[in-house]
């Protein structure tokens, strides 16, 4: 019974992380649309700035973190560190996606010089 409960919790956390990744990709796409409308379109190939493998890697990294690590990572970014693990993981994943996009945008501008 305990193993089944643990498996159910892991499944719920994975589902929450996947949902967070989807929300982050949607938010990234909206940001990209805004940037395009303002004439600041990214030069990356896809709308999120991250490919599927990168999204999966970020999701797996965040999902593997324990509560202490999640809270610490959120605190470092000035984000709310309260809630259950799926909420913390989703919040951190969204932040990590934004960071990766910003880093990719900075990298692409450096490459053009």
Image (cartoon, rainbow, N blue to C red):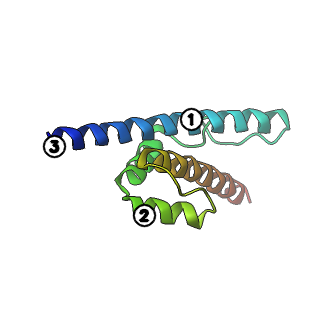
Mark 1 or mark 3: which is in front? 3
Question: Of 103 and 99, which appears nearest the observer?
Answer: 99
Circle 1: element type: helix
- Residue 44 position, x and y percent, is 63, 42
Q: Which residue is identified by label 2?
A: 69
Residue displayed at 46% across by 38% down:
52
Label 1: how many residues lie within 10 Å, few (<14), some (14-19) or many (20+)? some
Label 3: how many residues lie within 10 Å, few (<14), some (14-19) or many (20+)? few
Q: CA distance from mark 2 to mark 3?
A: 23 Å
Residue displayed at 18% across by 38% down:
4
Q: In the picture shown, does residue 94 fall above or below 103?
A: above
Q: In the picture shown, does residue 63 fall above or below 110?
A: above
Circle 2: element type: helix
Question: Of 3 and 56, which appears nearest the observer?
Answer: 3
Label at residue 75: none
Circle 3: element type: helix
- Residue 58 position, x and y percent, is 45, 49
If you read the primary sequence from the N terminus, does the residue marked by circle 1 or circle 3 appear first? 3
Report which quarter residue 11 is drawn in.
top left
Report which quarter residue 65 is drawn in.
bottom left
Name the quarter where the C terminus is drawn. Answer: bottom right
Q: Which residue is identified by label 1?
A: 23
Residue displayed at 38% across by 49% down:
63
Q: Which residue is identified by label 3?
A: 3
């Amino acid at each position: 019974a305990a193993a089944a409960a643990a498996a159910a919790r892991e499944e719920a956390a994975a589902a929450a992380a996947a949902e967070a990744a989807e929300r982050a990709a949607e938010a990234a796409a909206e940001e990209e649309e805004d940037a395009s409308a303002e004439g600041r379109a990214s030069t990356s190939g896809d709308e999120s700035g991250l490919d599927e493998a990168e999204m999966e890697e970020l999701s797996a990294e965040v999902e593997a973190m324990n509560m202490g690590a999640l809270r610490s990572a959120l605190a470092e970014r000035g984000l709310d560190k309260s809630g259950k693990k799926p909420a913390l993981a989703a919040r951190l994943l969204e932040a990590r996606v934004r960071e990766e996009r910003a880093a990719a945008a900075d990298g692409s501008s450096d490459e053009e010089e």
